Amino acid sequence: MDFSWTHEQVELYDRALAFARAQLPEAAKPSKEALPRDLWQRCGEFGFLGLPVPAAHGGLGLDTLTTARVMEALGRGCVDTGLVFSVGAHLFACVMPILESGDDAQKSRYLPRLCSGEWVGANAISEPEAGSDVFALKTRAVRDGDSYVLDGGKSYVTNGPSADVFLVYAATQPAHGYMGLSAFLVEKDTPGLSVGRAFEKMGLSTSPIAPIYLEGCRVPESARLGAEGQGAAMFKRSMQWERACLFAAYVGVMERVLEQTADFARTRKQFKKALGKNQAISHKLADMKQRLEASRLLLYQACWKMDRGQDAVMEVSLAKLAISEAAIQSGLDAIQIHGGMGYVAETGIERVLRDAIPSAIFSGTSEIQRDIIANQLGL
Ligand SMILES: Cc1cc2nc3c(=O)[nH]c(=O)nc-3n(C[C@H](O)[C@H](O)[C@H](O)COP(=O)(O)OP(=O)(O)OC[C@H]3O[C@@H](n4cnc5c(N)ncnc54)[C@H](O)[C@@H]3O)c2cc1C
């Protein structure tokens, strides 16, 4: 096994980290209603919005492992994890399905706009009655001549209030269950599509999320992504991307928080000695480091297998589960080590925990990841 990075990978990571630190600060007025378009465009200028997309379509053409490594730099360098999450949702659950399943016309219409930062993409599958049991969705797409009419509602759509295009999953053959789902690209001004009120949430507060409604929403046949019946497989594939590469950003967040917390433990003195000289504190930091590196290795293993076209279902779920639960525990430890300063919002420490908690829910909950792992064990 070779754990070394190439010169190009090191250079790209360093550049991404420096760019994220210098160019992606918190928006002047953070909002749950809309993404800050100036920061979004800067993400596009660097290439974050199209990391694994070939250059011919406006991306950087990276492999999965390098994509994950750059997402790590983004998560480490940009304190606005809401923005980073929006980038990941856009890229892995909307852009990648278009790249992997789109026809030439769809690729040339959407990919350059989505990669450059001109447009925002969203993925809409979850419904009030179809969360973890996502393939029980009720949204219908009924063929009518050379178009489809979509009816239904989607409960949580990240980037929904800002999105220019939605990747909507609907049943074209409800009796066929998993094999009866199809995917459609629905542009924001399509009659019959409306975006509901943006939700307030505990964390990731700069990543807007809202329900969307489809009422007699007519789209041409050319809006269907892939063949009829391919929607579920396409969604599963997009979750592989998201569970690996979006979660790489949380590895970066953990690294930033560890550095910040270790610095604090070295400099803050109580009882005439640095906090870190107490084993109760230094062991917490050792555990933070162990969780970070274990998560990272599981992530790299999953990406390595994805790059070789190998079945990585088990590895991706192991990585997603480990990273999300490690990020939450490290967020808790960071607050405890910072004491009162960890709890007040100004220091930005408590926010790390608030931003980490939903990572055990989206992209398939921790319980669902354990189910997948157990299933892979033949249980
Ligand atoms: C910040 C955020 C962003 C999101 N963005 C999007 C998006 O862009 N697009 C989109 O379509 N969706 C999105 N979602 C929705 C997300 O995918 C769902 O919340 C998630 O799949 C869980 O579904 P649910 O909330 O309905 O919970 P439920 O499925 O109702 O689950 C509730 C609890 O029961 C557990 N549970 C469910 N079934 C089982 C089982 N069989 N065994 C054991 N435990 C079980 C779950 O693990 C969970 O703990 C987002 C969610 C969040 C929090």
Image (cartoon, grey):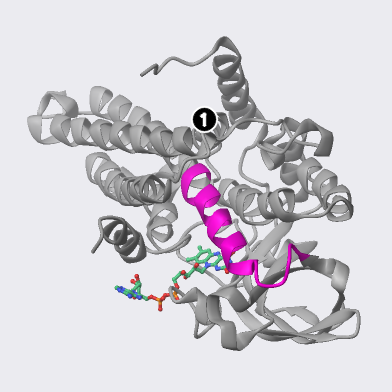
Q: Which residues are magenta?
A: 225-245
Position of 128 relative to 66 (above/below): below
User: Toward which corner of the image does residue 218 lie, by quadrant?
Assistant: bottom right
| Residue 311 pos. (x, y %) | 45, 46
Return the x and y of residue 157 as percentages of the image width and height.
Answer: 62, 68
Residue at coordinates 68% horizontally, 72% vertically from top-left? Answer: 182
In this view, 361 is above or below 253: below
Quadrant observed for ligand 1 in the rendered image? bottom left
Who is closer to the viewer here, 371 or 282? 371
Q: Amino acid at mark 1?
A: Arg
Q: Which residue is mark 1?
A: 69
Viewport quadrant of the C terminus: bottom left
Magenta region includes residue 233: yes
**221 and 67: which one is in front?**
221
Q: What kind of secondary structure does the magenta stretch mostly adopt?
A: helix
Name the residue rendered at 39%, 32% in the picture.
255
For the image, the number of numbered tags is 1
